[in-house]
Image (cartoon, rainbow, N blue to C red):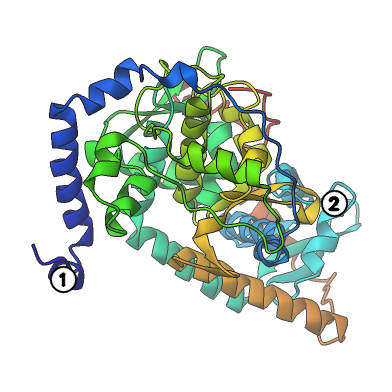
Amino acid sequence: MDFDNYKSKGNLRVLVYIMFRGVFGIARNSGFVHGYEQGYIYQQKFSLVNIKLKWVKDRTLDGVVAGQRDVKATGTLVSIIHSSSQCCLPIYHLSRYRGQLGLPGDLKLSTFIRRYPNIFIESCFLDTGGSPVPWFSLSPEALDLHYQEVSIIQQRQLELRDRLCKLLMLTSDRTLPLQTIDQLKWDLGLPYDYQHSFIPNHPERFSYVRLPDDRVGLKLLFWDDELAISELQKNSYLQQKGEEDIKNGTLAFSVSFTRGFGLKRKCMEWLKEWQKLPYTSPYTNASHLDPRTDVSEKRVVGVFHELLHLTLHKQTERKNVSNLRRPLALPQKFTKAFERHPGIFYISKKSDTQTVVLREAYYGQEPVQNHPLVQIREEFASLMKKGLLDRSRGVYKRNRDTNSVDGFRNEACIADETNQLSSKDKSDSILYDYDSDSPLQSSC
């Protein structure tokens, strides 16, 4: 089979799937798949080796993470403002969504918004008591980028659907609370209002369900075998590692360390042996694995490796995975895998939070694969940087027209009320009592 011809014709995905079907067919016939399900006879011999690796600052990857928090907050605010009927909202309305923005507690929302006058245009209206109230709308440049983003989401609808499907396929019962998905929606590239603008477009794949704790969850209705192939398995073929690794289940992760890391010989030997341990696909049942073994830890690493590959930036805040232990059937203290494998993951401590970055996804500060939505976000970041610089130079001046039409404020308030569900819709909708800005529970 001519690999180059298939690749040039854009049939790479088809080729990879055919190759995997062939090899996994051989593996299934030889008992390899059943071996995963029944457990490895020798797995109990590999106890969890007590290895501690130091954290070393990586300025290059810190540079990748820097500014992501502000870009996310800005993108969320743009979506919220654009969703209003007049594309203009008062500061007290925007403050209701502060919990979704991830901004420092001591930073006033209005202060943050005013940093970027080339994105958010400020106006001022008098309330019923005669006090001025700041209102914010979007600049033409911000609207243009937002429309481009919406267009890309429409064009990539199936791809984003598959990302969400794969996330749910990683869970033990194919279900996640909406609060947990909300934490990851920016990372996955889902639209801000995905519950209403995205999920209803795929009734054959997703359904809202009531969870035992009375929260609202999203359930996967259809298991797609073509999606149940991990990125590590896929890359092993693209890099021509051979069929034996797949059949034997000894796939190794890509490893690289921060310059000057200085890995000790004992740690190098352990890592070399650890890489040779069986690889359990994150899409298979791993209940047979003893959580006290390195084999189980390799499965945990594989789950996070796959999870980060599902994100656009190949990174997510550490707190975003805190509630995934039960849904993903992970052992206690599962996030320790990040510290034990700094050659696979890097924990950045920029912006007063911990962000887990997949090392293999970056060449320096450049992503190996640059998604169109990431490019839009980079344009937002450039616009923000320009606005902040111009503001410091006094280019922009706040334009508050206290004599503006009071009716505009009234119309916006009326529109806000009409956007709410009617009393009849409330009783019929499972999403009515779902509050996307409510505090997250400690576990799923």
Q: Is residue 8 left or right of residue 336?
A: left
Position of 287 relative to 17 (above/below)? above
Image location of residue 216, percent across then percent down: 51, 24
Image location of residue 212, percent across then percent down: 52, 12
Q: Name the one closer to the observer, 349 or 412.
A: 349
Q: Which class describes the residues within 10 Å of circle 2: few (<14), some (14-19), or many (20+)?
A: few
Disc 2 residue type (three-letter): Thr
- SS at circle 1: loop
Q: Name the one closer to the observer, 36 or 419.
A: 36
Question: Which of the 4 image quadrants contains residue 437?
Answer: top right
- SS at circle 2: loop
Image location of residue 254, percent across then percent down: 47, 53
Image location of residue 270, percent across then percent down: 57, 38
Question: Mark number for residue 9?
Answer: 1
Question: Mark number for residue 127?
Answer: none
Which quarter of the rendered picture does the C terminus lie within? top right
Q: Name the one closer to the observer, 14 or 181.
A: 14
Position of 144 relative to 313 (above/below)? below
According to the picture, the residue beneath numbered tag 2 turns out to be 128
Disc 1 residue type (three-letter): Lys
